[in-house]
Amino acid sequence: MPGFFREAARRVFAQELKDSNLTSRDESDQYAPQYVLTPTGAKVNRIFIVGTLIEKEDIGTDSEYWRGRVSDPTGSFLVYAGQYQPEAAQFLAECELPAFVAIVGKTSTYTTDDGNVLTSIRPESIQQVDELTRNLWVLDTAKQTLERIRAVEAEEDQNSKIAKEHYSTDTSYYRAIVKKALESLKEME
Amino acid sequence: MKQIAESIRDRFLKLGIDVPVEDIENRLDELITKFKVPSNEAQRSVTNYFLKKYSIPKNEFYVRQAEPHLTKIIDILENGQWANLKAKVVQLWENTHESISQVGLLGDETGIIKFTAWKNAELPELEQGESYFFRSVVVGEYNGRFQVQLNKNTSIEKLDETIVVGGGDFIPAPRESELRNVSDLAGGQWTTVKGKVVQLWENSHESIEQAGLIGDPTGVIKFTNWASSELPDMEEGKSYMLKNVVVNEWGGKIQIQLNRSSSIEELDEDIKVGSLTSTYFGAMVDIQTGSGLIKRCPECKRALVKGACPEHGKVKGEYDLRIKAVLDSGTSTQDALINRELTEELAGLSLDTAIAMAADALDPGVVLDKLKQELLGRYYTVTGHKLDRYILVDSITPKTSLDRDMLDEMLTLNETLTKPEVQ
């Protein structure tokens, strides 16, 4: 497969993903991956999150279709798993709430009738993990978000520029989010 | 249609054959109208029909057609194109296949191109340095490069004039290829490499003299020394200069190959195989198929696919445990191969237990599930030798504590950087 490479799993806090509404896709290639560009310029196709699974519900009509809500220090992610994510669906069906979970998945977007863009995650895998892993993820994500904020402020690369232009990103808002996340770790000392 | 028919008739008239134009038209009409054949295809098919009917050899007919047009090498741009070339035989190569009579390079003032003369074309032998007029050669594409093929329809005529070959920097004499670092090698190059033989592998095929890994301070690469190269053997742990080797890419992996024009020189110095180990920190985001409880061929240790070894066929496999993991830092990914010992340690699962689990469930997949459950989503640091896209893991450590210093540092960094924004 020439030119094949694996998409890195980006680290983005729930609040930032929720704020995202810019999708891009190479239209000339029907197999091209779809990306969501977040306000701090993360170009997300695959995402890695660790958080607390706080709700789950089978919203399927004919077959099982699970919706899970996973929270992090800034907000929550929505995760959908159906027949094409059998392992994830089975996990959601069986697990007990609440639980720390690590999820690797692809982002997908849905535009509502009134033009809002909703982002959610289709999991490739869900595993139950310990609290340490969750804390490590928060630190990791804070670090990477901070790095992106810096790049947006400096308008360093293409993604930062596009993000700033599209969202008029208020970086102090995202710095506050990072701070909130970091302080939540601090409190646990 | 009338026009096409007339043009076909004209071409036959030049050969002294008068084909009734109604016959041509009827045939064309049937193909084009009734069978929806595109007109150029129909034209060719009808022409071929009459060639056959009047027993005119195809090459004779087409050569006459094509003769006026001469192609320069630089204009060769289309796979499947027919061409007539006036060119010089710049170089003749070792013949690599029994169905080929000659192979080498042709050149004219505009460039150089590879040629292949097929044995069944029964063409006269070409001599290096002589110039020829090649009629009706076919352009083919191989590995993204054009070449011309001399086949049954080709005719060759020796020229008295000498064709001047352009691109003056081309030296047909034995090439001295550039000395490169292992880490700089890219597919399709000829190169010279200085390195130490890190590992010799058991020979898996009679056409291979030796295969293994060679490394220099910048990295390690697989090498293959073909038996046909008639080069001396190398020893593990010794350093060598490998001249004129070919770098090629197969399935995304780069390796070097020694052939008949390569040479091996033993070196007195001991080359340090540097940066052999690389370290990567990230979250384990995937455990790929082929992980968990697998079977290996008892002879070559390769993993079996559906109980068969790609080399030795159906064999009674030996059980093994391994993980093909993908680690992810958020900005890059790294494939890592984790052997049995480390897998056992990491997952707290011995090979025997794994076999028992699989037997119990009648499914080796349970072992893979168990590994995923234990490892996915966690953060690890791996170190090990890097071999193309993999790190062959020597050690893997889970991250066991939150870095408080880093946390404080980042809080400060976030604050200090925020200030100018606030002002």
Image: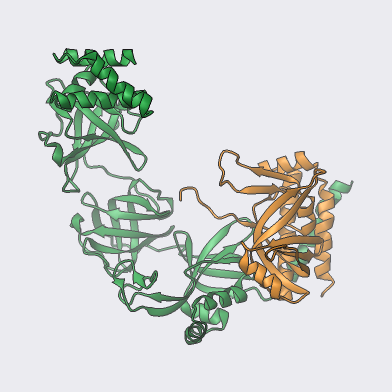
Residue A77: image x %, image y %? 76, 60
Residue A109: image x %, image y %? 71, 50
- Quadrant of the image occupied by residue A70: bottom right
Residue extending farthest left: B124
- Would residue B227 be seen by someone viewing this image from the given angle? yes
Chain painted orange: A
Q: Is residue B180 left or right of residue B51?
A: right
Q: Is residue B384 above or below residue B33?
A: below
Q: Is residue B169 above or below residue B71?
A: below
Give the quadrant of the C terminus of chain A.
bottom right
Residue at (14, 24) in percent of width and height: B56
Q: Is residue A185 left or right of residue B12?
A: right
Residue B4: image x %, image y %? 31, 16
Q: Nearer the viewer, residue A137 or B8?
A: B8
- Quadrant of the image occupied by residue B101: top left
Chain painted green: B
Residue at (74, 43) in percent of width and height: A163
Residue extending farthest right: B423
Residue B51: image x %, image y %? 18, 24
- Would residue B402 be seen by someone viewing this image from the given angle? no
Q: Is residue A116 left or right of residue B163?
A: right
